[in-house]
Image: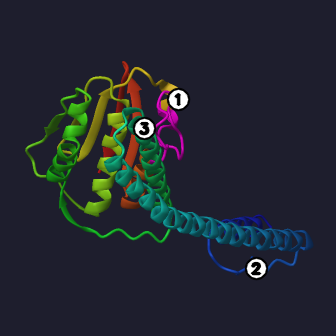
């Protein structure tokens, strides 16, 4: 009897994690064991029905977000075009200030639309990275340099410390670049006075900056979807969550720590 119960328990655990319509089979003649097996089979049927319902609903939601993002892109781009044309004709200073407010709001909507689209595509289970041999040293350096002017505009001189040893990984260079870019963009929003990016010989990349306006609770949720630090109303809360999803797709670990008023985003390749 113990052997039969143990087999049923193992079979239930296996079937619950497998995409199959198979049921638990028991060769026992004991009525109680047969009743238990039938009861567990009923639970498996109910569980699979819920899984199918969830997967179907999740796909419909993702498809809706993608479609809405596409539908919003065109009118927002058109609005931006008209704003630019108005700017050429308007000479009044006060009117130009109001036009700047409109354009800023439109740009925020465009950024949100792009991030919603990016998150939905990245979260798709069918996401397939394009794996190629990539030199991480150069990829990291190029990403930081792409944001150099944005840092200097805030009075920050970015520091890069990359090991001399060439670090190669078989990875999706485009996705890796997006991880870097999202992390660096986040640093530009939150950094107080400095920013550094380091790559060691083990393939561990650390992005660090002083950040006095956040706390340990913020850091615990910083990589969560839609989470934003209260002091930063410009953030959509999707940038770092997209970075984490991409890291997971590529088999990497992305984490955040906070110590001595310094925020560290650590990517382990």
**Circle 3 Cα neighbour tier, 10 Å, few/some/many (<14 / 14–19 / ≥20):** few
Is 87 left or right of 138, judged from the image as shown? right
Residue farthest left in this picture: 164
How far across and how far down the image is residue 150, in percent?
25, 38
Residue 199 in view of the camera: no
What residue did someone put label 3 on?
95
Q: Give 86 or 62, whichever is nearer the viewer.
A: 86
> Mark 2 or 1, which is nearer the eye?
1
What residue did someone put label 1 on?
230
Q: Report the Cα–Cα distance between label 3 and label 1.
A: 31 Å
How far across and how far down the image is residue 191, in percent?
33, 28
Q: Report the Cα–Cα distance between label 2 and label 3.
A: 77 Å
Q: Tell which circle, 2 or 1, labels the residue nearer the N-terminal end.
A: 2
Residue 145 in view of the camera: yes
Asked which secondary structure carries label 2, the reply is: loop
Q: Tell which circle, 3 or 1, labels the residue nearer the N-terminal end.
A: 3
Q: Main secondary structure of the magenta part?
A: loop
Cβ atoms under marks 2 and 3 closer than 8 Å: no
How far across and how far down the image is residue 164, in percent?
7, 44
**Circle 2 Cα neighbour tier, 10 Å, few/some/many (<14 / 14–19 / ≥20):** some
Disc number for residue 25: 2
Residue farthest right in this picture: 31
- Magenta region, residue range: 219-238
Instruction: Say above or below: 91 vs 215.
Output: below
């Amino acid at each position: 009897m113990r052997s039969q119960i143990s087999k049923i328990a193992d079979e239930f655990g296996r079937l619950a994690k497998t995409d199959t319509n198979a049921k638990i089979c028991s060769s026992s003649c004991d009525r109680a064991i047969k009743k238990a097996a039938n009861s567990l089979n009923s639970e498996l049927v109910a569980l699979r029905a819920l899984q199918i319902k969830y997967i179907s609903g999740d796909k419909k939601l993702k498809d809706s977000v993608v479609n809405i993002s596409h539908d919003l892109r065109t009118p927002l781009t058109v609005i931006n075009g008209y704003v630019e044309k108005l700017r050429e004709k308007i000479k009044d200073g006060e009117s130009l200030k109001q036009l700047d407010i409109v354009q800023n709001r439109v740009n925020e909507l465009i950024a949100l639309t792009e991030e919603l689209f990016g998150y939905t595509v990245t979260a798709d289970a069918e996401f397939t990275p394009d794996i190629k041999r990539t030199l991480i040293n150069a990829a990291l350096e190029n990403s930081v340099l792409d944001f150099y002017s944005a840092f200097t505009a805030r009075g920050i001189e970015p520091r890069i410390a990359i090991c001399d040893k060439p670090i190669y990984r078989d990875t999706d260079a485009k996705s890796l670049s997006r991880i870097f870019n999202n992390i660096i963009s986040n640093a530009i929003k939150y950094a107080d006075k400095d920013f550094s990016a380091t790559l060691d010989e083990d393939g561990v990349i650390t992005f660090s900056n002083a950040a006095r306006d956040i706390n340990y609770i913020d850091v615990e949720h910083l990589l969560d979807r839609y989470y934003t630090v209260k002091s930063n109303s410009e953030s959509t809360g999707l940038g770092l969550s997209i970075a984490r999803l991409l890291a997971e797709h590529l088999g990497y670990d992305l984490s955040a720590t906070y110590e001595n008023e310094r925020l560290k985003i650590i990517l382990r390749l």
